[in-house]
Image (cartoon, rainbow, N blue to C red):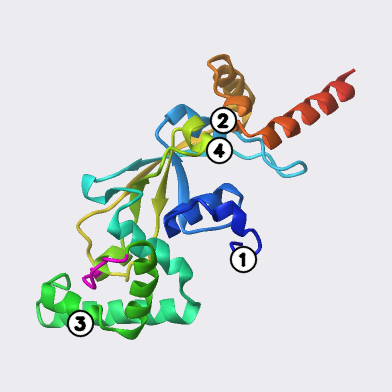
Amino acid sequence: MISVQPHEFASDETMFDKLVRMQHFGLPTRLLDVSRNALVALFFATEPGPIGSEPSDGIVTAFAIPSELEKHYDSDSVSCIANLANMTSEEKDGIYRSIDRRLRLAESLNEDISSDKNIKKFNKDGGVERLLQFIRVEKPHFQPIMNPIDLLVPYYVHPKMSNRRILAQSGAFIIYGFDRPKNRFFPYQIEETQFAVPQSEKSHIREALGNIGIDESTLFPEIDKAAARIENDYKTRERMG
């Protein structure tokens, strides 16, 4: 995407910035859009779905974020995960195998994988050294002390509030690294609680949200979105009258 639209990314300083922009334009990334405003989340949960699809209930998911997993856009831990997007599938597989191998070894020796000794060994692995190269493009003084655990845990990230849509939607992101190896305990977890939004209530909820200023016109402030809304409004009126 960067190669075909380089001008769109000219102001982005980090790989996380680039992933946010890619997400904005609809490209799948390792980011999950979230909102700090529960009513904004409710608006998206009342999406009617594609034309012709079967009606279905919506879901609002609430995430309980431990303070240890809360980061800002310039965090080193966020840079480590974000730059996995620069790696090939083979390189990422190699790093994951290295993490799994070192977890097993540390467990068998009753050691902490996050000890200085184990971190130093991990950062000398070939795939990890390649990842460090990408991180140093944005952070030249980044030290080879990457903790393997940082590539396994999701982080809640406060982004730069420089995007109109992020501002309008009280947006933030959860960035995901590798899947955690099964049957292994991690002290910090992001707990999820889901709330069902009945399909039969979606239109009523949307109307109520609109009455307090939460609708497409406020959540999607870009001009192309405004043009699409105006076009859709005219088509709707033509069908009705």
Earlier in the chain: of badge 4 and badge 3, it is 4
How dense is the environment of label 1, judged by Cα within 10 Å: few (below 14), some, or many (20 and up)? few
The magenta span reads 140-147
* Amino acid type assigned to the residue bearing label 3 in the image: Lys
Mark 4 residue element? strand
Q: Which residue lies under the disc numbered 4?
A: 58
Query: Looking at this view, is 219 or 65 the one in front?
Result: 219
What numbered label is drawn on residue 219? 2
| Separation of residues labelled 4 and 3 (CA atoms) | 46 Å
Return the residue at label 1.
3
Q: Amino acid at mark 2?
A: Leu
Eye-nearest disc, 3 or 1? 1
Q: Are marks 2 and 1 in contact (CB under 8 Å)?
A: no
User: As displayed, is residue 222 above or below residue 52?
Assistant: above
Q: For the residue carrying disc 4, how many other residues have a C-alpha within 10 Å: few (<14), some (14-19), or many (20+)?
A: many
Secondary structure under badge 3? helix
Q: Residue most toward the top?
A: 211
- Mark 2 or mark 1: name the one nearer the start of the chain: 1
